[in-house]
Image: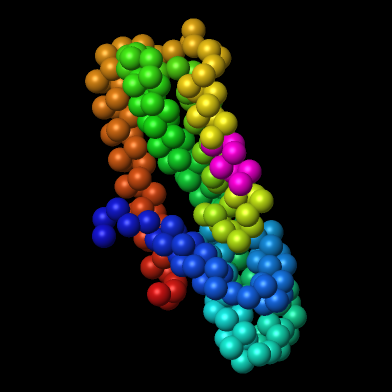
C-alpha cells in the first residue's frame, strides 16, 4: 500500500508480542532491549533485531527455559555479536532517520494545532509561532522519548510522552505566548499548504521505511 508505514507496522507487531509475555521472561528480555537501543544502528534494523529477540524469548517461554539458554550465550553478548558481524555503521544514519521522523511529526502536529486553534479562535488566517514551538516539543517527545512507538512496555515513559503532548496542546489553546508573532494570510491558503505538507511528509516517510524494510526478511 502506498501510505503504509513499515516502521510503524513492525513496532506495533513487537508491542503486540510483548503484551502477551509473562513478567519473568520480560525481566530477562528488558535489559537486553535497553542495551540494544544504546547502539547507533539504523532504526528499522533495531526493530528487526528486537523482533528476533522477542520471538526467541517467546520460544524460551514455551520451552520453560531461560532466554540465555535459548540464545546459547548471555543476551548482551548475543547483541554484541550481531552488531559486530553486521555492516560497518556510524551514528549518522540513525540521527538522520530521527530528524526525518521529527520533521514528519512536526508537520502533522502543526496542522492539528492550527486546525484546533482556528476552530476555537476563528482565526484560520494566522499560524502562530507558539503553535510551531509546541508542535516541535510534541514531535520531539515522539522521536526521542521512548514510549509506545518504540518500547510500548515502558508505561512510565509512555505516560510522560503523552503528558508532553497534552501539555503542548493546552498551551496552544489557553496561552498567549508569542501570539504577536504569526504568519498571517488567507486561512484557506495556510490550511491548504499545511495539508499538502502533511501529505507529502507522510508519503516521504512511508516510502523511506518501505525501502528500508525491503532489506530485511522480517514478515
Q: In the image, residue 183 lies at what x, y percent?
A: 40, 14
Residue 77 magenta: no
Residue name at image x 38 percent, y 19 percent: 120
Taking 152 as reference, is 74 above or below it?
Answer: below
Tell me which corner region of the image, top left, top right, bottom left or bottom right, holds residue 58. bottom right
Residue 160 magenta: yes
Which quadrant: the N terminus? bottom left
Q: In the image, residue 130 lies at what x, y percent?
A: 51, 20
Q: In the image, residue 6 lies at what x, y percent?
A: 39, 61
Residue name at image x 52 percent, y 64 percent: 15
* Most foreground residue, 171 or 85: 171
Taking 181 as reference, is 204 above or below it?
Answer: below
Query: How many numbered marks appear?
Result: 0
Tell me which corner region of the image, top left, top right, bottom left or bottom right, holds residue 62. bottom right
**What's the image's color scheme?**
rainbow
The secondary structure making up most of the magenta span is helix
Q: In the image, residue 185 lies at what x, y percent?
A: 31, 12
Taking 31 as reference, is 164 above or below it?
Answer: above
Q: Is residue 89 left or right of residue 9?
A: right
* Most foreground residue, 178 or 196: 178
Q: Is residue 128 left or right of residue 168?
A: left
Q: Is residue 14 visible?
A: no
Residue name at image x 51 percent, y 50 percent: 97
Which quadrant: the C terminus? bottom left
Residue name at image x 54 percent, y 79 percent: 55
Task: Please provide the residue range marked out in magenta.
Answer: 159-165
Q: Is residue 70 visible?
A: yes
Taking 177 as reference, is 87 above or below it?
Answer: below
Q: Is residue 54 left or right of residue 66?
A: left
- Residue that protrudes farthest toward the top in the picture: 180
- Residue that protrudes farthest toward the bottom in the picture: 63
Amino acid at each position: 500500500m502506498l501510505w503504509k508505514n513499515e516502521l510503524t507496522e513492525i513496532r506495533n507487531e513487537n508491542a503486540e508480542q510483548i503484551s502477551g509475555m509473562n513478567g519473568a521472561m520480560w525481566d530477562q528480555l528488558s535489559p537486553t532491549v535497553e542495551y540494544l537501543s544504546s547502539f547507533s544502528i539504523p532504526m528499522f534494523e533495531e526493530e528487526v533485531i528486537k523482533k528476533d529477540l522477542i520471538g526467541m524469548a517467546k520460544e524460551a517461554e514455551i520451552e520453560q527455559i531461560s532466554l540465555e539458554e535459548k540464545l546459547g550465550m548471555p543476551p548482551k553478548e548475543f547483541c554484541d555479536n550481531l552488531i559486530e558481524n553486521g555492516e560497518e555503521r556510524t551514528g549518522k544514519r540513525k540521527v538522520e532517520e530521527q530528524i526525518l521522523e521529527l520533521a514528519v511529526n512536526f508537520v502533522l502536529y502543526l496542522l492539528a494545532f492550527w486546525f484546533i486553534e482556528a476552530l476555537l479562535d476563528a482565526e484560520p488566517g494566522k499560524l502562530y509561532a507558539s503553535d510551531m514551538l509546541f508542535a516541535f516539543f510534541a514531535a520531539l517527545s515522539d522521536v526521542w522519548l521512548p514510549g509506545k512507538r518504540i518500547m510500548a512496555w515502558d508505561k512510565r515513559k509512555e505516560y510522560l510522552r503523552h503528558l508532553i503532548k497534552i501539555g503542548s496542546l493546552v498551551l496552544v489553546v489557553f496561552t498567549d505566548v508569542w501570539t504577536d508573532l504569526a504568519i498571517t494570510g488567507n486561512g484557506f491558503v495556510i490550511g491548504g499548504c499545511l495539508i499538502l505538507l502533511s501529505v507529502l511528509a507522510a508519503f516521504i516517510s512511508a516510502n523511506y521505511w518501505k525501502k528500508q524494510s525491503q532489506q530485511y526478511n522480517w514478515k
